[in-house]
Image: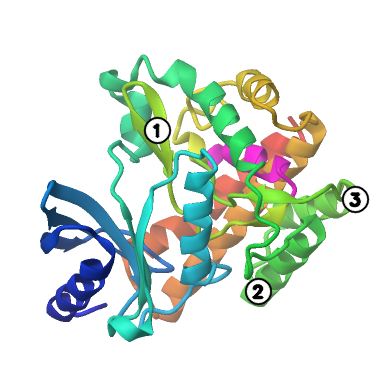
Amino acid sequence: MADPAALEAGLGRALEACLAGFRGLRDLRRLSGGASAETWAFEAECDEGPLPLVLRGRLGGTEAGGASLPIEVEAALVALAQQSGVPAPRVHCVLDASHGIGVGYVMQRMPGETLARRILREERFAAARPRMAAQCGAILARLHRVPCEDLAGLPSLGAAEQIAHNRRVYDELAQPHPVFELAFRFLEECRPDAVEAALVHGDFRNGNLLVEESGVTGVLDWELAHRGDPMEDLGWLCVPPWRFGEIDRAVGGFGEREDLYRAYEAAGGRSVEPERVRFWEVFGALKWGVICVGMYGIWKSGLDDSVERAAIGRRASEAEVDLLRLLAP
């Protein structure tokens, strides 16, 4: 973790060069989460008043995790998405090694709630929930049209590559789950033909969406973005773990597939193929199951003996139930 005093000093030097009227910063605090990078919130004091900001980066020796994008590519992508009309944070400043605190970027701190259980249960979001599936469809249609061909460092990941990657990870974990084997067989036998690649967010789901009383207002956590099949995002949004107990509402626990698909097409998205989306939903449920098994392996090894790791590891059994519901409804 970055040293707070050194971080504040280096961050101040960087902001002097990119924020007009910058006079200092206050209330620097680390936010929870951040497996692939550290996230810090603070306020910049400017001539026009306080500006709520977020720093996301690999600071103080933090290393990239898994398939995460290099932080400079992530910053460029978030800026490109925001400039293309996707409700993503505005990027104010990009940090590099010359700033002496690691690499990262400073972005707008957008208002809204991200905790899914609050969004799905609290009365203040009651009017928003029925709108959110259609809002997600419209946002994804816009996101999938972002021109990313010239963005260096953004990988291309089709179905074959992703199945093979998860198969390797699963085999290395050496924790056999017969239902996972059944899912791998389904994915190999039912793999759809390749399509023209589009920008794929890679983690578009309840929990990475900012929500206010009016509905979805922002999209966060772009580190898994890639070029690929746009139906992957629609399928991932419908994977059962992201329903957080509201299992009968397929889209994030708040909406219906029909509303998502209709709004996606109406906003200029490609024609939705339900069977292709189903393929990616099965893939997503299997991917989550492999992640859970991996969490258990980390806990068992002693590298991280936190209760959170162990609890997520136990959820591999939930993934098996989800896969059986998808494969044999």
Looking at the rendered image, the disc whose residue lies closer to the viewer, 1 or 3, is 1
122 relative to 153 in the view: left or right: left
Which is more toward the observer, 153 or 302? 153
Frontmost of labels 2 and 1 is 1
- Identify the residue at horizontal 33%, vertical 85% (top origin): 98
Q: Nearer the viewer, residue 169 or 95?
A: 95
Location of residue 284 in the rendering, given as x and y in whole percent from the top left corner: 64, 48
Q: Residue at x 47, y 16 (%)?
A: 130
How far apart marks 2 and 1 lie (CA) works out to 41 Å
Say few, some or many: other residues with alpha carbon within 10 Å of mark 2 (under 14 / 14 to 19 / 20 or more): few
At a point 61% along the width and 19% down the height, the residue shown is 259
Q: Is residue 78 above or below residue 230?
A: below
Residue 217 is marked as: 1
Q: Secondary structure at mark 2?
A: loop
Which of the marked residues, 2 or 1, is nearer the chain's N terminus? Answer: 2
**Magenta span of residues:** 229-241
Q: Is residue 226 magenta?
A: no
Q: Position of residue 325 (x, y in %)?
A: 68, 35
SS assignment at label 1: strand
- State the residue position of label 2: 174
Amino acid type, residue under disc 3 in the picture:
Glu
Quarter location, residue 170: bottom right
- Image coords of residue 313 (percent x, y): 48, 60
**Front residue of this view, candidates 227 and 126:** 227
Circle 3 sits on which residue? 189
- For mark 3, does the 10 Å Cα neighbourhood hold few (<14), some (14 to 19), or many (20 or more) residues? few
Tell me the quadrant of the picture where the N terminus can be found: bottom left
